[in-house]
Image (cartoon, rainbow, N blue to C red):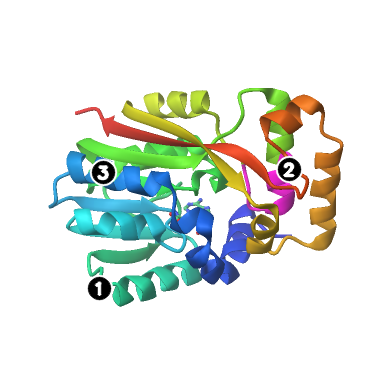
């Protein structure tokens, strides 16, 4: 029987190529907004950190705006994909390091920018991870957190989190906007900007990316078929199983 950390490795390690080409990950309004926020809010000489870098889309977007960026992930093959693509794009500012959000291998106050995108819903100890993110920032440093959000309505949330877990056993929990705000406040991070937008998950590519076994795909479809109207409406569940969730972006500053 695996630990959660082993499940994360076994889920993500074979899938670096799928994440490098995934349309949900390689594009999106968040990457454009992230570039603007960092270009205007962070000095060009900044040291930056990307936690749960995956195949590196956020790192590639931000690296041109900072002096140095460390991309951290527990998965060696994700890190290898980041190194290869960074070299091909001549992004020499990017360095990779194996690690987890809950135990960042850096001294206090190392970075002027710490960011994370589409990774936090895999973190088991989120309070510790957000404290770690804040710890490695310099006072007055900036943080950028992007993730798919949990639903405020518990009925809708239970259906959504169940579909996510059936699709990917390394899923822990999408936090709601209110949960994120409380986590950040406790870690000494003040919100400067917030944006939210709908993200449509195309069912076929969503399960394909994680190679969800057919029997689990069938359970997700049966869960969707039996979902009450308010859940189907809130998640905009479509005939082919595609559905829509909210993504949130938080731009924050550590107290000086
Ligand atoms: C969907 S991918 C990230 C996408 C990427 N940030 C981007 O911008 O395209 C999620 C990543 O989170 C990583 N991850 C899972 N648990 C983690 C943890 N506890 N700490 C840091 N990273 C973690 C996984 O290995 C995986 O590479």
Residue 161 x %, y %? 68, 39
* Beta carbon at label 1 within 8 Å of ligand 1: no
Q: Position of residue 40 (x, y in %)?
A: 18, 41
Horizontal and vertical percent position of residue 141? 22, 38
Q: Is residue 104 visible?
A: yes
Q: Which mark is residue 169?
A: none
SS category of the residue bearing label 2: loop
Looking at the image, can residue 108 be seen?
A: no
Check the image and report above or below for 115 versus 216: above
Tag 1 and tag 3, C-beta contact below 8 Å: no
Which residue lies under the disc numbered 3?
Answer: 36
Looking at the image, which residue is at 40% across and 44% down?
30
Q: Which mark is residue 90?
A: 1
Magenta stretch: give its range.
162-172
In primary-sequence order, the first of circles 3 and 2 is: 3
* Mark 1 → mark 3, Cα distance in angstroms: 21 Å
Residue at the image position 75 percent from the left and 25 percent from the top: 230
Front label number (3 vs 2): 2
Camera-near label (1 vs 3) is: 3
Q: Label 3, secondary structure: give it.
A: helix
Q: Nearer the viewer, residue 109 or 45?
A: 45
Q: Nearer the viewer, residue 107 or 254?
A: 254
- Where 75 sits versus 194, above or below? below
Q: Is residue 151 left or right of residue 57?
A: right
Pointer 2: residues within 10 angstroms few (<14), some, or many (20+)? some
Task: Give the image quarter of residue 72.
Answer: bottom left
Disc 2: which residue: 238
> Disc 1 on helix, strand or loop?
loop
């Amino acid at each position: 029987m695996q630990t959660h950390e082993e499940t994360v490795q076994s889920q993500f390690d074979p899938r670096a190529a799928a994440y490098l080409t995934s349309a949900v990950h390689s594009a999106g309004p968040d990457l454009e907004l992230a570039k603007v926020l960092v270009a205007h809010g962070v000095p060009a000489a900044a040291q930056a950190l990307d936690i749960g870098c995956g195949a590196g889309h956020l790192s590639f977007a931000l690296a041109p705006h900072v002096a140095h960026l460390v991309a951290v992930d527990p998965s060696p093959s994700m890190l290898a994909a980041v190194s290869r693509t960074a070299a091909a794009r001549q992004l020499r500012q990017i360095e990779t390091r194996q690690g987890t959000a809950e135990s960042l291998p850096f001294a206090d106050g190392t970075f002027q920018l710490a960011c994370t995108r589409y990774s936090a819903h895999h973190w088991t100890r989120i309070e510790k991870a957000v404290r770690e993110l804040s710890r490695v920032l310099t006072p007055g440093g900036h943080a950028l957190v992007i993730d798919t959000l949990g639903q405020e309505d518990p009925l809708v949330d239970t259906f959504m989190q169940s579909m996510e877990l059936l699709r990917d056993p390394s899923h822990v929990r999408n936090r709601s906007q209110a949960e994120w705000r409380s986590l950040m406040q406790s870690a000494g991070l003040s919100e400067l900007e917030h944006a939210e937008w709908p993200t449509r998950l195309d069912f076929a590519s969503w399960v394909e990316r994680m190679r969800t076994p057919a029997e689990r795909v069938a359970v997700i479809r049966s869960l969707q078929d039996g979902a009450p109207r308010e859940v189907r409406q809130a998640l905009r569940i479509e005939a082919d199983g595609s559905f829509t969730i909210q993504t949130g972006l938080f731009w924050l500053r550590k107290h000086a």
